Image: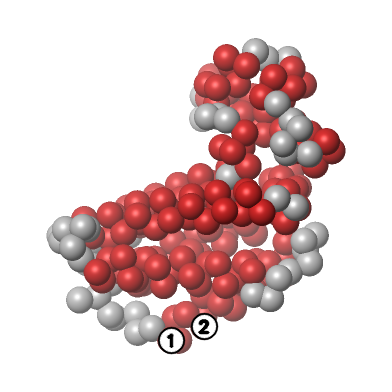
């Protein structure tokens, strides 16, 4: 990452950190883009170069996870079974969690507290997850040389993989401060998913 990219990433994280703190201190609905921008000494116009709005900030974990999964899928062997590739993609997300910095962990925990207190954001999170599933299904269909609009297998295997992630994160609901517990349960759930669905299933 060059100097320009590092500066942009530093600004992006500063905006994110300020927003999460404000959301938790004074409420999501009461926080404005202008307040977030002001807290990091940038203009609202600059804010919108990094984030589309408050909802985008609240769903940053989806963006990060989707990018990791798509990058992993594109790096897997072209002839690898779809389910196997998706399990590698889930493990890449898990690895990112385990390798996260203390600052990344703090952001993740703040986001979970935010979602727990705002059902509206939970609904947006579900909708954002559906967008991710569609993009993953398109990637799987392209790898298999089929039409994503008509190929049920691509959608089904992605839905199974994403359900694995949801169950790993939420069942049972973890103590919000324990990231290691969340990561450990996700690992266990991935192993369970692999035992339930044959890794050679790809047609």
- Residue 35 drawn above or below residue 80: above
Residue 33 seen in the current view: yes
Where is residue 203? Give x, y as percent.
20, 76
Q: Which residue is mark 1?
A: 196
Where is residue 69? Give x, y as percent.
43, 55
- Residue 88 drawn above or below residue 60: below
Q: Residues within 10 Å of mark 2 (few under 14, many from 20)?
A: few
- Residue 29 drawn above or below residue 92: above
Do residues under tags 2 and 1 come within 8 Å of each other at their CB atoms?
A: yes
The residue depicted at 43 percent of the width and 56 percent of the height is 130
- The number of discs equals 2
Under tag 2, what secondary structure?
helix
Residue 3 seen in the current view: no
- What's the mark number on residue 9? none
- Residue 186 drawn above or below residue 115: below
Q: Tell me if 50 is positioned left or right of 79 in this view.
A: right
The residue depicted at 61 percent of the width and 54 percent of the height is 122
Q: Which residue is mark 2?
A: 192
What whole-number distance in Å separates the C-alpha atoms at marks 2 and 1? 6 Å
Q: Tell me if 142 is positioned left or right of 8 in this view.
A: left
């Amino acid at each position: 990452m060059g100097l320009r990219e590092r500066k942009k990433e530093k600004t992006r994280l500063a905006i994110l950190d300020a927003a999460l703190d404000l959301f938790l201190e004074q409420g999501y609905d009461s926080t404005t883009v202008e307040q977030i921008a002001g807290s990091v000494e940038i203009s609202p116009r600059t804010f919108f170069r990094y984030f589309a709005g408050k909802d985008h900030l609240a769903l940053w974990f989806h963006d990060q996870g989707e990018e990791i999964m798509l990058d992993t899928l594109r790096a897997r062997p072209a002839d690898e079974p779809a389910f196997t590739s998706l399990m590698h993609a889930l493990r890449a997300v898990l690895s990112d969690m385990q390798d996260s910095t203390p600052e990344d962990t703090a952001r993740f925990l703040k986001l979970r507290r935010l979602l727990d207190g705002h059902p509206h954001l939970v609904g947006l999170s579900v909708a954002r997850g559906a967008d991710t599933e569609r993009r993953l299904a398109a990637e799987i269909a392209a790898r298999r040389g089929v039409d994503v609009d008509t190929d049920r297998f691509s959608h089904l295997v992605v839905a199974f993989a994403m359900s694995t992630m949801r169950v790993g994160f939420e069942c049972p609901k973890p103590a919000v401060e324990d990231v290691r517990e969340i990561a450990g349960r996700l690992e266990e759930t991935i192993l369970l998913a692999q035992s339930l669905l044959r890794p050679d299933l790809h047609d």
